[in-house]
Amino acid sequence: MLKFQTAGESHGQGLLAILSGLPAGLRIDFDYVNFELKRRMGGYGRGGRMKIESDSAQFLSGIRHGQTIGSPIAMLIENRDWSNWKDSMAVTDHPETRAKYKPLSPPRPGHADLAGCLKYNFRDARYVLERASARETAARVGIGALAKLFLREFGIEVASHVVAVGRVALPPQIVPFEVVLALRAKEDILLSCVDPAVEEKMKQEVDLATQDRDTVGGTFEVRARGVPPGLGACAQWDERLDGQLAQAIMSIQAVKGVEIGSAVENAAHFGSQVQDEIGYSREESRFTRKSNRAGGIEGGMTNGEEIIVRGFLKPISTLRRPLESVSFETREPVKAAYERSDVCVVPAAGVVGEAMAALILARAFLEKFGGDSIEETRRNYEGYMDQVRRY
């Protein structure tokens, strides 16, 4: 099974990720991995941290001479900002530098600060926020790029675009996958919207939030094309692929809602209006759908149509005008602490959403087709697809 974990703090020495379960023989495009990391750092409304960091993946194990060897892959992304935090984030205790520890108190509304301090018995939210920070998602994007490279071996592509920033949204429409994929080639990511006129209005929404010392959220959409039918299962609750994708997207910091297909719109219509009627293409020897309101998943399993998942991102919690909080020491009302932050992170969240979707799809793919080498996986996959075509 494909498994991964990340480690590291926002202002620590670096971020670590371990990915196990990729078959041997997968050729790794290191430039592509670093390009994905760069995409995560872009977008209009990002803060000063992105001017400090220049994320680059260092692979410590699991890859030799440019290809996977079947053992766990260890990846490191160094934090350049670490040089400014060596005393306050030191692993060993140095009493003489405790004045530089940069404690964070009082807790900030909307963050993990208060819940984490209560859980771990801290009076300093620094120890909570360092791991709860969205900086951790750089590690996910790095190993998510490996999952994308694996899926590409079987004709599966994953992409994302922004459908809403604050009060500005794309008109309801089905955007062709090629248009979404083309956003990847743009030099200036801006807000990752397929419509330049709508994107300009989104930019104005970010400008307004910046002027008001506020933040703005939005919605991103992740799409996956070329996914074969039959990934996931209906047999057990935790095997349902829509549930796995929803949990993966919801795990992204600041995401507070997930939609698969046109779920929200479907809820307001009768059943006869929302089911995807079935057809058959003799030219392609496959079953087809006249629509894709289910977002490519029925009964917890992929049905061969595009996967469509949306993540709804709240405005990030660190405001330039701090909100009301309470002092840990006195229990009296005070203004919350403030740390450097972004104004809008919706395009970056979309890139993270791609990584998480790719990791879940790659795991489901390997659960179905197995294989200790990429050649074995390909044989199993091709045999299954021949069975599907002959059904």
Image: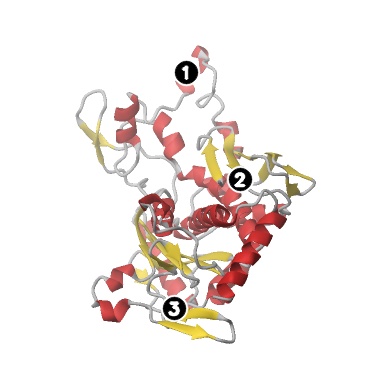
Residue appearing at x 30%, y 68% in the figure: 264
Residue type at mark 1: give it: Arg
Q: Nearer the viewer, mark 2 or mark 1?
A: 2
Quarter of the rendering occupied by the C terminus: bottom right
Q: Residue 80, percent across and down?
A: 61, 39
Residue appearing at x 41%, y 48% in the figure: 253
Q: Nearer the viewer, mark 3 or mark 1?
A: 3
Count residues near mark 3 (Cα–Cα under 10 Å), then give few for <14, some for 14-19, many for 20+: few
Q: Nearer the viewer, mark 3 or mark 2?
A: 2
**Residue 345: which quarter of the image?**
bottom left
* Distance CA(mark 3)–CA(mark 1): 56 Å
Residue type at mark 2: give it: Gly
Q: Residue furthest left?
A: 332
Height in image: 288 above or below 297?
A: below
Height in image: 48 above or below 274?
A: above
**Residue 184: which quarter of the image?**
bottom right
Identify residue for label 3. Answer: 174
Image position of 176 (left or right of 310): right
Residue appearing at x 37%, y 40% in the figure: 338
Label 3 sits on a secondary structure element that is: loop
Query: What's the image's color scheme?
Result: secondary structure
Residue type at mark 3: give it: Ile
Identify residue for label 2. Answer: 21
Q: Name the residue nearer the viewer: 178 or 93.
A: 178
Identify residue for label 1. Answer: 98
Residue appearing at x 45%, y 35% in the figure: 130
Label drawn at residue 348: none
